[in-house]
Image (cartoon, rainbow, N blue to C red):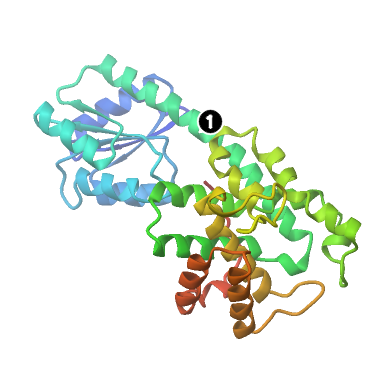
Amino acid sequence: MSPPSNTDSPLVLVIDDNHAVRRLLRHIMEREGHRVIEARDGAEGLTLLSERDPDLVLLDLDMPKMGGLEFCQLIKSQSRTRLVPVVIITGRSVEEARLHAWELGADDFLTKPFQNNEVVTRCNALLRVKKLVDQLDDAQAVLFAMARAVEAKSPHTHGHTERVTEYALALARKLGVSPADLDVLRVGAALHDLGKIGIPDEILNKPGKLTPEEYAIVKLHPVAGVRIVEPLKSVRQSLPMVRWHHERMDGGGYPDGIFGGSIPYLVRILSVADVYDALSSSRPYRPKLPTDQCLAILRKEAAGGGLDPELVDCFIAMLPELSAIADKGILLPAGN
């Protein structure tokens, strides 16, 4: 049977060193209307993975060159592929296969010899989940595109979001923040200024001091950003960073005037990164400031109740490690 021509149908990557098994799995999947690509071992599978974006991987464990264990570990540790469902198909004992499946982050497993209808049921269930995940990714991609549009409104903000994201993540890693919270921080940092999309260009690019009325408009952007983001459930954990990145430890920030411990830890991390990049970058009303002056202002803000003093101290101590970030281009996350 020839492969389906519909490029919208799910793409299944079958990795097994046994030609007969690969042929059988191809037949099962193509009969369901799915497209199939094949690899004889993990190394060949990685090559295909670099060229294509499969929706599902059917993976044998015992293969030459690179076995299923190593392959699964690799793709589940990379942001681009970690959400691709992996079904391990093995001839090992059920107990051993189950243990490896869960340890490696695989999504399901089947033992050889397998029943065709069981393969179909398990795979179609995982493909339905993958489709839902892709829809969430599509919605997030729209938000990230809007974030890029915000930066495009002013030449002075070019690269700001990406640098702030990298600064914040580097500081968070230094502080031992969990991988799950790093993902939340990454999204929040990427979207923190999204609300500025509604601020007139003449205000964003004004070379002089803003009037009280103009500043009041600027101060609306955190709430505006939340209104844009909150309908998307997949990014709701990042809402505090969008809303509160201009709050102060002494309660003098905006929009809600919260203070101290009421400001979430990830928000405080983001605020340090955001303030530093604002100081060390050119703005319509001033050129970028020398590093020594930036650090002096950070310390002053910490002492005066603006920023978390411990986070500022940690950020300053690791600044030599961050020196390359200022030269980076815009690399907003696509979802990790």
Q: Position of residue 28 (x, y in %)?
A: 31, 22
Residue at the left extreme of this rendering: 93
Q: Residue at x 41, y 46 (%)?
A: 180
- Compared with residue 171, is residue 30 higher up or lower down, i.e. above or below? above
Assess disc 1: are there few (<14), some (14-19) or many (≥20) residues with their C-alpha within 10 Å of its C-alpha. Answer: few
Q: Position of residue 92 (x, y in %)?
A: 10, 32
**Residue 304 or 45: which is nearer the viewer?**
304
- Compared with residue 8, is residue 284 higher up or lower down, i.e. above or below? below
Residue 19, by quadrant, is: top left
Residue 236, by quadrant, is: top right
Q: Is 184 positioned to the left or the right of 107 in the image?
A: right
Q: Position of residue 17 (x, y in %)?
A: 19, 40
**Residue 213 or 201: which is nearer the viewer?**
213
- The reply to whether residue 333 is in sight is no
Q: Residue at x 88, y 72 (%)?
A: 208
- The reply to whether residue 56 is in sight is yes
Q: Is 119 positioned to the left or the right of 8 in the image?
A: left
Q: Quadrant of the N terminus?
A: top left
Q: Secondary structure at mark 1?
A: loop
Kindly identify the amino acid type of the residue bearing the numbered disc 1: Asp
Q: Position of residue 13 (x, y in %)?
A: 35, 37
Q: Which residue is mark 1?
A: 8
Q: Residue at x 63, y 69 (%)?
A: 304
Q: Is 224 positioned to the left or the right of 88 in the image?
A: right
